[in-house]
Each structure stands twice: as structure tokens, then as C-alpha cells.
Amino acid sequence: MGLERIALISDVHGNLTALEAVLADIGQRGITRIFNLGDYVGKGPRGQAVVDRCRDVCEVNILGNWDDFLPDPEREYDSEGLRWWQAEIREEQGKWLRDLPFCHDFVLSGRRIRLFHASATTVHRRVRFDHDEAEFLGMFANTPATGDGPIPDVVGYGDTHDAFYEVDLERRTLFNTGSVGNSMGDPTPVYTILEGVPDSLDPAPFSIQFVRVPYDVEAELEVARELGMPEYAGYELELRDGIYRGNLAPGESPSYHRRSPTPAST
């Protein structure tokens, strides 16, 4: 059996313009399998369209933290933005999002791979790129959320909007896909390509590739303005400068801001 490529996307966050640019790049490469690691909605103006598009093109869809809490009928925290983003998606979409699986396990080139959104325990626990050893090892553990099964050799996740790749001395591999619709640092959308022999436990060539795809940022921001989306200034800051909206002090210029390696929240 020959090598196969799988595209991993994550954290689109209602940014349909970025999603379409990434999907076009995936299509130009002849990749037909797309796995989505969650956070379809919130932050951007077109969560409804993003959900519909991903349901149509993604073979695997996984639960994200925004997908869990935004449509939660018992959600206690509220704001103008949250009310707007929740109203923008259809009720059945909210149910679909909350019913998504927590993780997805599969085999590629002899490696057991596990994908989830944020951590092995919950979509609401964040593991950043500057984690400690205990956090690293915890990403490979079986938990009530992941269920029992073979322990993975490779774990991929999203959530932090900051792509990275790490391997330890036991050849455990941890990587973050980065974000399609709300990338931090470099605001250019990024996704990941896995390549290997599918469904095979025999050792074979295996690769992880990160791809950044330019897109029309101005067109996306124009849509947000036309729709009257709340928190527009924060969205513009993130899309133009890759700076998390909570990291810029009042009166501080983005041009002089150095992004913290541990954003307050994403």
C-alpha cells in the first residue's frame, strides 16, 4: 500500500475566508481526507457557514472548547459577543457541535495517532508549547475522556493557535496544528499534513508538514463590519497582527508589541 496524505485543520473560528483559502490549497495538493480538530465557531462572523462547510468536506470532526460551551443551554458566562455568535448558528448546529467526539485514534505507518482539541482530559484544559514534562506525558495518557485503547505514539491537537512539533527520547511525538482562522504570532492561516501508510502497524515512512496559506484578510474583516459583529477591534487585531486581544495593554501599539509565548486565552 502506498503513502497517503491527511490534512488536519483546527480553530477556524467563523473565519470562512481563511477556511476557503486553506481548502483550496488542500485541493490543489490532491488531498481528499480532511480531519478537523475543533473550534468551528466564535471570534469570527460566519460560524454557521463554517460548520456547514466542514460537515460537508471533513471526514473527521472533533469537539472544541468553543463548540462545547458556546451552544451550552446551561452556560452561565455571557457577553454581547457570545450572544451574537450563538444566535448566528442554527440550533441544530449547536447540538451537532456539542455531540462531536472528543478524540479520534488511527494508525499511520506503524504509529498510533491520537487527535483531540486541547488535552487528554478535557477540551477546556490548555497545554501550551512551553509545557513541562508532566504535561507532555499527560497528552499520551488514556483518560475517561479518551477512553481505553492502545497508548498513542503521536498526539496532535489545536486550541492554542500556535503550531509546534516536539519529540522526546522515547520517540513520542507531540504536535500542534496551529489555527486556520485565528493564528497567533504569524497571523497567516496554518494547517498540517500527515503522510504515511494508512491502517498499517508496519514501520514505514512518516512525515508531518506545516503549511501556511495567505488569504484576503481585508475581505474577512469587511464581512465582520458589514454584519455588525461585536468585538470587532479584537478580531482585527488578531487577524492583522496575530496578537491575542487580551494581551495588548490599553494605548499600546501593536507594532511595538512582542507576543507573549503564553497567550492569556484562545
Image: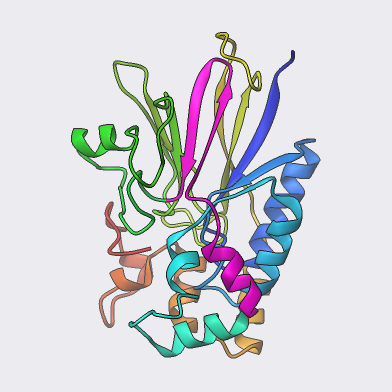
Left or right of 23 on screen, residue 212: left
Assess whether residue 22 is covered by the magenta stretch: no
Instruction: Please name the residue shown 60% across and 76% down the image.
Output: 221
Left or right of 41 on screen, residue 134: left
With respect to residue 223, does 64 lie above or below?
Answer: above
Q: Position of residue 234 (x, y in %)?
A: 43, 77
- Between 144 and 56, the one nearer to me in the picture: 144
Assess whether residue 92 is covered by the magenta stretch: yes
- Between 26 and 54, the one nearer to me in the picture: 54
Left or right of 76 on screen, residue 36: right
Q: Quadrant of the C terminus?
A: bottom left
Q: Quadrant of the N terminus?
A: top right
Residue 259 in sight: yes
Q: Position of residue 117 (x, y in %)?
A: 45, 50
Q: Quadrant of residue 225?
A: bottom right
Instruction: Please name the residue shown 33% across and 82% down the image.
Output: 77
Q: Position of residue 21 (x, y in %)?
A: 71, 55
With respect to residue 89, does 6 lie above or below?
Answer: above
- Between 264 and 188, the one nearer to me in the picture: 264
With respect to residue 46, does 34 lie above or below?
Answer: above
User: What is the total number of numbered labels drawn onto the structure image?
Assistant: 0
Residue 46 in sight: no
- Between 72 and 15, the one nearer to me in the picture: 72
Q: Quadrant of residue 211?
A: top right
Q: Which residues are magenta?
A: 90-117
Instruction: Please name the residue shown 56% across and 13% down the image.
Output: 201
Q: Position of residue 197 (x, y in %)?
A: 65, 18
Instruction: Please name the residue shown 72% across and 65% down the image.
Output: 52
Q: Quadrant of residue 154?
A: top left
